[in-house]
Image (cartoon, coloured by chain):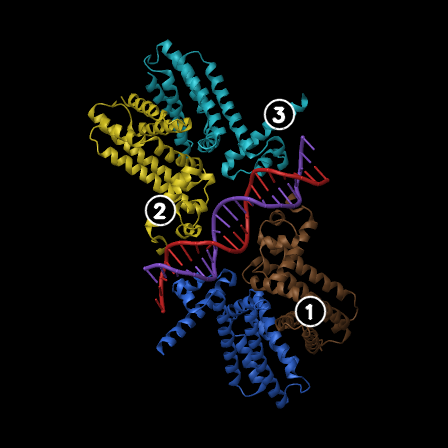
Chain colours: A brown, B blue, C yellow, D cyan, E purple, F red
DNA sequence: TATGAATGAGAATTCATTCAT
DNA sequence: TATGAATGAATTCTCATTCAT
C-alpha cells in the first residue's frame, strides 16, 4: 500500500521518540501526545503515520529488538574464536548502565504485556530465536575448538544463556545501582563460562 | 478485636480477588470495578479497605511475594541435604504450568513497573533478598557437605541462581506451551547443578 | 441485569434531555456533553445510564415513537365513528406547529439514518406497523359503517395514509412557515377523505 | 475557455463521486478523503474545486435535484395526454429499486438537515416548486381533458401528489425489500388516480 | 493544478475517586 | 460498614482545513 511509504525516515523518527518517551516515562504514562511532544510534532502526525497506538508500540518493539539483535550479531561476527565471540556478545549486551536501563525498562514493559498481546509475543519469539542462534553458533564453534564441553546440547543450552543474561540484567535494573552493572556482568560471564566448560 | 479481624479477613479476600483479576486480565485492564466484581462486593468496599488503587496493588505484591517465599522456605526446610533442598526449592518454584503462569504474569506486570514505582521496587528487593538467602544457605550447606565447589562465593552466586530461575520461567511463559514447563525446569536444574559443582 | 434498573426515572430524564437537544441542535451537532448539559448533569452520568451514544439514540427513538403512537391510539379510541376517529387521528398527528417541528426534525434525522442503522430501521418498522393498524381499524369500521369505499383493501391503503401524513408534514417542515401548518393539515385531511370515499 | 471547461468537467466528476460516496456510506461517514478516493484524486483537489465540505454538499444537492427534475420533466413532455403524462411522471420517479435507493438515501440525508441548513432548504424548495409545476400542469391538462375533477385546485393538490410520492418511497426504502418497489408504485399510482378523479 | 504532510479542535469513552444515603 | 450514583480529568482517535512543494 502507498499508505506505508510515507517517508520511512519520519516513521523512524517517531519510533525513536516513542522509545525515548517509553524509557523515560514508562508504558503506562506514555500517551500519543507524549510521543508527539518527544518527536516535536503535532498529535495528528502520529496518527498519520500509524493506524493507532497499538501499531506504534508493535512497530517500536519490532524495530527495537531488531536493532539490538543486529548489534549483537555484528559484534560477534568481528571475532573469530568462541571465547572472543562470547566476550563480544556479552560486551554488546552489557553495553552500559544508561543504555541497558533504557532498553530493559522498555523491554520489560513489553514483556509484561507479551503474555496477553500476541503481536508482542510473536516479535519477542523472533528475538529469542535470533539471540538463541547467536549463542548456539558460539557454542558449536567452542565445541569444535575444544574449549566448551562437547556433551552439551547447543539447542538446550542456548536458551539458558539468554535466561542468565536477561535474569541478571533485570536484577541489576531493580538494584538501581549503576556500579553494580559491572558486577552483574562479571557474574553473568562467569556463570556462562562455568556452564559451558 | 473482632472488628479488626473481620476487616483483616476481608482485606485478604480483596487481595485474593485482585490477584485473580490481575492474572486473568492483566494490570492494564484491571479497574477497581473489576476487583470489586471478582470479590463480589461493591466498588465502594475496595475504597473502604484501601486508600486508593495504588495501595491495593502495593499490598498485593507484598502479600504475593511473601506467600511465595514462605512456600519456598517451608519446602526447603523439610529437606536435610543440600541437593535435597535444592530439588525441593526448584520443585516449589516450578510448581505447575497453571500456577506459574498466574504468578509470573502478575509478577512481570509488577516488575515492569518496579523500576519506576519505588514501593514495588522495595518489595521486590525484599523478595530478592529472601530468595537469595535460601540459595545461599543451600550453597553453604552443600559446600560443607563437599558436593558444591568450595571456591564459589555464595553471596555472588545466589543472585545468579535466581536469575536463571526467573529467566527460564519468563522464557517458558513466552512460549505459551505448557509441555515445555518440564523442559525448562530440567534445563534450569542442570544449569544450576553445573554452576555449583 | 441490575445494570438496567438504575432509576428508570433518571433514564427518562436523560432521554427527554436528548430529545430537546436533538430537536434544537440536530443529530450531527449533538454530543454527549450537550445531552449532559441539557439534563444538567455531568458527562459521566450519560455513560453511567447508557453504554454508549448509540444506545442513547436507539432508546430515544424507541421511547419517542412509542409515545407518539400511544397518544394517537388514545385519541382515536375516544371516538366511536370512523370519521370521528379519523379526525381525532389527524388532530393528534397535526397537533401544533411547535410540537410537529420538534418531533419531525428529530424523526427525519433518525429516518435518514435508518436505511443504514438496523436498530433504527427496526424501531421505525414497529412504528409504521402500529400507525398502520390505527388506519386499518378506522378503515374497516368506516367500511362497516358504509362511509368508506368497501372495495378498498385496508392493508394496502393504510400505508398510503401514513405516506400522505408524513409527506405533508415533511413538506410543511421544509416550508418553515407555521401558518401553513393548518393548510397542510387540511390538504392531508381532504386527500385522505377522497382516497377512502 | 478550455480552462474553465476542464475544471467544470472535473467539478462534475467530483460531484458524481460525492454522490456515490454518500449513497454508499451515508452523510455521516463521508469525509473529504472518501470523496477524493471515490474520484480517484488527492484530497487537495477537492479543496481546490470547492471552498469547503459544505460547498461540495450544497453543490451536490443542487446538481442532484436539478438532474432528477430534468429527467422527470423530459419524460412527461414526451406524452400528450394527462394520464399519459402522469404515468410517465411516475415511471420516471419510480425508476428502479437500485436508483431509488441511491437517490432517496442521499435525499433523506439532505432533507434531515434542511430544516437547519438554509442552503439545503432553499434548494429543496426549488425542487418542490419544480415538481409541483409538473403535477400542476398535468392536472390542468387533465381538467381540460375532462379526466380529472375540475373542482380541485391544482395549486393545493400538486403538493399532496409529491407528498404521496415521497411518503411512499420513504416507506419503501425503510422496508429494505426490492420486491415491494412495484407494490408501492402501484399504491402510489392508484392513490393519485383516486385523488384526482 | 495537484499532492499529501501537518495541524489541532473536538468527540466518545474510561475510570479513579468522592460522597450522600 | 456498605452501596452505587455522580463527577470530571485524561486518553484515543477523526477529520476539515492549511500550506509548502
Name the spot of residue C27 as percent of width and height, x first: 44, 39
Answer with left or right where residue D147 lies relative to residue A179: left
Residue highlighted by disc 2: C13
Say few, some or many: other residues with alpha carbon within 10 Å of mark 1 (under 14 / 14 to 19 / 20 or more).
some
The reply to whether callout 3 and callout 2 are in contact (CB within 8 Å) is no
Residue D8 is labelled as: 3
The reply to whether callout 1 and callout 3 are in contact (CB within 8 Å) is no
How many angstroms separate mark 3 from mark 2 (CA)? 52 Å
Q: Nearer the viewer, residue B130 or A85?
A: B130
Residue B41 sits above or below residue C124 on the image? below
Q: Secondary structure at mark 2?
A: helix
* The C terminus of chain B - image quarter: bottom right
Q: Nearer the viewer, residue A32 or B102?
A: A32
Front of the two marks 3 and 2:
2
Q: Nearer the viewer, residue B92 or D60?
A: D60
Answer with left or right where residue C174 lies relative to residue B177: left
Q: Secondary structure at mark 3?
A: helix
State the image quarter where residue B17 is shown: bottom left
One can see residue C148 in this view: yes
What residue do we see at 66% from left, 61% from top?
A65
> The disc numbered 2 marks a residue on which chain?
C
> The disc numbered 3 marks a residue on which chain?
D
Q: Secondary structure at mark 1?
A: helix
How many angstroms separate mark 1 from mark 3 (CA)? 66 Å
Q: Nearer the viewer, residue A82 or B16?
A: B16
Q: Same chain for marks 1 and 3?
A: no
Say few, some or many: other residues with alpha carbon within 10 Å of mark 2 (under 14 / 14 to 19 / 20 or more).
few
How many angstroms separate mark 1 from mark 2 (CA)? 60 Å
Answer with left or right where residue B56 lies relative to residue C6: right
State the image quarter where residue B190 is shown: bottom right
* The N terminus of chain B - image quarter: bottom left
Residue highlighted by disc 1: A97
Amino acid at each position: 500500500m502507498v499508505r506505508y511509504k510515507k517517508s520511512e525516515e519520519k516513521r523512524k523518527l517517531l519510533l525513536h521518540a516513542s522509545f525515548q518517551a517509553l524509557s523515560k516515562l514508562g508504558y503506562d504514562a506514555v500517551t500519543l501526545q507524549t510521543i508527539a511532544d518527544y518527536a516535536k510534532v503535532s498529535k495528528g502526525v502520529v496518527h498519520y503515520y500509524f493506524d493507532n497506538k497499538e501499531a506504534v508500540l508493535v512497530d517500536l518493539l519490532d524495530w527495537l529488538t531488531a536493532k539490538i539483535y543486529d548489534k549483537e550479531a555484528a559484534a560477534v561476527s568481528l571475532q573469530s574464536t568462541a571465547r572472543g565471540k562470547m566476550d563480544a556478545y556479552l560486551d554488546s549486551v552489557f553495553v552500559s548502565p544508561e543504555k541497558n536501563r533504557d532498553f530493559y525498562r522498555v523491554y520489560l514493559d513489553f514483556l509484561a504485556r507479551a503474555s496477553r498481546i500476541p503481536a508482542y509475543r510473536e516479535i519477542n519469539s523472533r528475538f529469542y530465536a535470533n539471540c538463541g542462534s547467536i549463542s548456539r553458533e558460539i557454542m558449536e564453534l567452542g565445541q569444535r575448538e575444544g574449549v566448551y564441553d562437547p556433551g552439551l546440547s547447543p539447542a538446550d543450552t542456548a536458551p539458558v544463556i539468554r535466561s542468565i543474561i536477561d535474569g541478571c540484567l533485570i536484577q541489576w535494573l531493580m538494584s538501581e545501582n549503576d556500579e553494580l552493572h559491572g558486577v552483574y556482568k562479571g557474574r553473568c560471564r562467569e556463570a556462562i563460562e562455568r556452564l559451558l566448560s
